[in-house]
Image: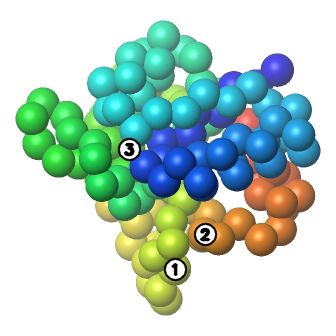
């Protein structure tokens, strides 16, 4: 069973994503917005995929506020965690945002919120796992 780590600051989104991923995808799900926990879990090889919210209101790393772009950069620059696929999840779906966010972060995918098509959401995550 694949494990998905959800990095999300909105408890409602966390609950909705978790429910979809468990019920439709058969995934094990873990969730946190604590950056140290994210990095530790990644280094321990726990997640098969990380769903990363771009805009995190309460996430800090080494005393500085960080967003999902920065956390993804940290993960992708570490030889122990760079292989873990990161999918950005964001409500910032303006034209050009996807390309900009992917280029800046080094993430492996992008899903815009709100997630309307639950099966497509699960299928896109499965595709990243199986690639």
The front one of 36 and 2 is: 36
Label 1 – label 3 distance at C-alpha: 18 Å
- Give the structural element (helix, strand or loop) at label 3: helix
Q: How many marks?
A: 3
| Residue farthest along the left direction in this orientation | 63
Q: Nearer the viewer, residue 41 or 96?
A: 41
Q: Residue at x 48, y 47 (%)?
A: 8
| Residue 105 horizontal/vertical position (percent) | 36, 54
Q: Residue under circle 3?
A: 72
Residue 103 x/y as whole percent: 39, 63
Image quadrant in which you'd find residue 22 = top right
Q: Quadrant of residue 50?
A: top right
Is residue 55 in sight in this rendering?
A: yes
The answer to whether residue 85 is above or below residue 28 is below
Question: Which numbered disc, 2 or 1, marks the residue that appears first in the sequence?
Answer: 1
Badge 2 local density, few (<14 within 10 Å), some, or many (20+)? few
Separation of disc 2 and disc 1 at Cα?
8 Å
> Which residue corresponds to the image point at 47% horizontal and 86% vertical from the top-left?
94
Q: Residue furthest top?
A: 44
Q: Residue at x 29, y 37 (%)?
A: 74
Q: Which mark is residue 93?
A: 1
Instruction: Pick whichever, 37 or 74, lies toward us.
Output: 37
Q: Quadrant of the C terminus?
A: top right
Q: Which residue is mark 2?
A: 113
């Amino acid at each position: 069973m694949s494990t998905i780590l959800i990095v999300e600051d909105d408890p409602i989104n966390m609950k909705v994503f978790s429910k979809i991923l468990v019920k439709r995808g058969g995934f094990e799900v873990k969730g946190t917005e604590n950056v140290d926990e994210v990095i530790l879990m990644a280094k321990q090889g726990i997640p098969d995929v990380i769903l990363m919210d771009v805009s995190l209101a309460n996430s800090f790393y080494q005393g500085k506020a960080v967003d999902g772009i920065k956390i993804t950069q940290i993960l992708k620059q570490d030889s122990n965690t760079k292989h873990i696929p990161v999918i950005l999840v964001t409500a910032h779906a303006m034209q050009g945002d996807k390309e900009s966010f992917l280029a800046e972060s080094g993430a492996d995918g992008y899903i815009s919120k709100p997630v309307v098509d639950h099966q497509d959401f699960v299928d896109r995550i499965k595709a990243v796992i199986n690639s």
